[in-house]
Amino acid sequence: MMPVSIENAIKALFQLAEVPPVTGQQCVVPLNELVGAYNLVCIEMATLTSEGASNYLLQRGVILQPLHMVIKEPLAGYVYVSKRVGYIFVEKDDPLGRRRFSVAHELGHYVLHFLPLLEHTRHAEHELLEITEALTWGNVEEEEKEEPPQGKVQPLRTELEKLLPSNEQMELEANQFAAELLMPELLVRELVKRFAVDCRGDDLIWRLATEMMMSRAAVKVRLHSLALLPTPAGVHEEG
Amino acid sequence: MGLEFLYKNGAQRMRDDIVGPLLLDNEYEQSDVQEVQQCLEYEYPAEKWSTLPVHHTSIPAEWSLCPQRFIDGKDLGRTVAWLQTEEWYPIPVRLSEIGAVIIQNVEGRLRREWYTIERVVAMIIDPFPWYEIESFAIALQEENLRLLPCKKPQGRLTYDFQEMRKATQNRTLDEMMRLEKRALVHTCDAPVLIDGRLESRYGGFDEMLTPVVGMIKGHHRDYLHKEGWRVYYSLRCGERTPAFLLKQKNIDVVSWYVRIDGTGGDLPNWGIVRLEIPAKFFEKLDKDWDYINRLSYLVCEYRCRDKSYERASVSLYPIQRAEESLGSLFTGADKIIQHFYKLTQL
């Protein structure tokens, strides 16, 4: 299976959704429109667990029997993909910025990992090809936690596992996809150029977070990754 | 959905703000309320506290630390609508025009050096579907309005509308202070006086290098000991209290009270303001008490003499001018609110 580059995947996604790239004036990425381009259904669920997601799909006749390995562990996001449908679930009570990041993370898995797998197995006999991924953010109370979320991809047929990259790699890629999708490098650079003149340190992060509708933690990580985080004014080392 | 978000979620217009229970001090964001440790014996021990006259202080013509720039901010707006969550929590929507300005004293003439103005819509967004808020934020951006997400009061939603309204108002005030910080950055470490606390503007100046002075009109905390209050109430115009140290989360400041206006028969605290300067900067001056005397004298000289101005007794003329200057650049609340109603079909 050919790996898909994140940059190309995002470009293709914007084209498919017929969404123009964001600009310095329109800085909020229309994630909902992008998700809609693949006919993925987004569901917000309170106290989300894989069991809850499985029950939801059962009740709506999407699946005929409960998904394998479902548990009651609280999740931030969950994705279920089959040859016919795709559902993204997010924890309804998470802060809005985090919910958007979770959706973008799951969309990243779909575009980068599941879609190529579906393509690869199109003519194969895997009629029951199903994949899920469960995402956690660690301590959900910490809105501004800076560590990226981690998940676990679970193809429901174990022989498909060897067609996918390692879980670590997929998680890394999904987080990178979410960050690049919601905070495009060109946009971030443009906003930094505009606001770093007089917004220092935490204020710059606050500003960018409201401009792009992201959490401050996500913005901080993105600025670090682009080496765009200046030293705050007035900070002196002791001695 | 876009701008129809409010209408489709059953939002209703609100007339002018009805101020219910007392708002939290508008200088403080919720998160800003914190412990302050004070060291009152910074200049004099308690038993030696007395009023200190400053009206005979001389200021050299070329005093390099004399504030020639003045910063003020403005938050002109109100709660324009409210809607409810699925659980019927009331969510206020505040529309504000916020701004900050630098007024510079150039050879005795005050002129506007820099300003910024923005229009913002503040509300608690977490109880709503992310895709609806996203679409609303995008539509607002197209209209040059920025959505400011507010924190829930005390970290939770409440059925108390006033508490929710207060949290929303605090958010726009907090954003206004961020604009003031931007103004501070533009002064490039030149001597500057800002209307408000330094703690809230931390990050906009260099506490070691910037000769920045914060002037606080309201007195919302009890910083003084018994002797301190005795001295406070016996201040006459042109007198100050001894200075004390306030240790805060972000910045330690040296602070003192000075009476800039006082006519017989007024309220006991009439015309008293509190000044603060960064402790690190003051200590770099080897605790030059003359610096404090000169600043005190200067604010007395700069006091607003326009008695028709509501807060004249605790205002400086350049700050009054700054406020007027910014006000003249604002579009006007009624016009913006009507436009907002039209856009959102409320």
Image: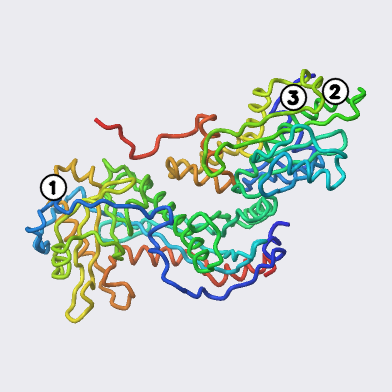
Pointers 3 and 1 within a single chain: no
Circle 1 — which element? loop
Judge the density around disc 2: few (<14), some (14-19), many (≥20) Cα neighbours within 10 Å.
few
**Residue on which disc 2 sits:** A120
Please indicate whether residue B20 sits to the left or right of residue A61 in the image.
Answer: left
Total labels: the figure holds 3
Judge the density around disc 1: few (<14), some (14-19), many (≥20) Cα neighbours within 10 Å.
few
- Image coordinates of residue A161 in percent, x first then y, are 77, 21
Chain bearing mark 1: B
Circle 3 — which element? loop
Residue in the image at 10% along x and 54% along y: B44
Q: At label 1, which amino acid type do we have?
A: Asp
- Image coordinates of residue B232 in percent, x first then y, are 17, 66
**Residue on which disc 1 sits:** B288
Pointers 2 and 1 within a single chain: no
**Residue on which disc 3 sits:** A4
Please indicate whether residue A155 sits to the left or right of residue B142 in the image.
Answer: right
* Numbered disc in front, either 3 or 2: 2
- Image coordinates of residue A98 in percent, x first then y, are 61, 43
Q: At label 2, which amino acid type do we have?
A: His
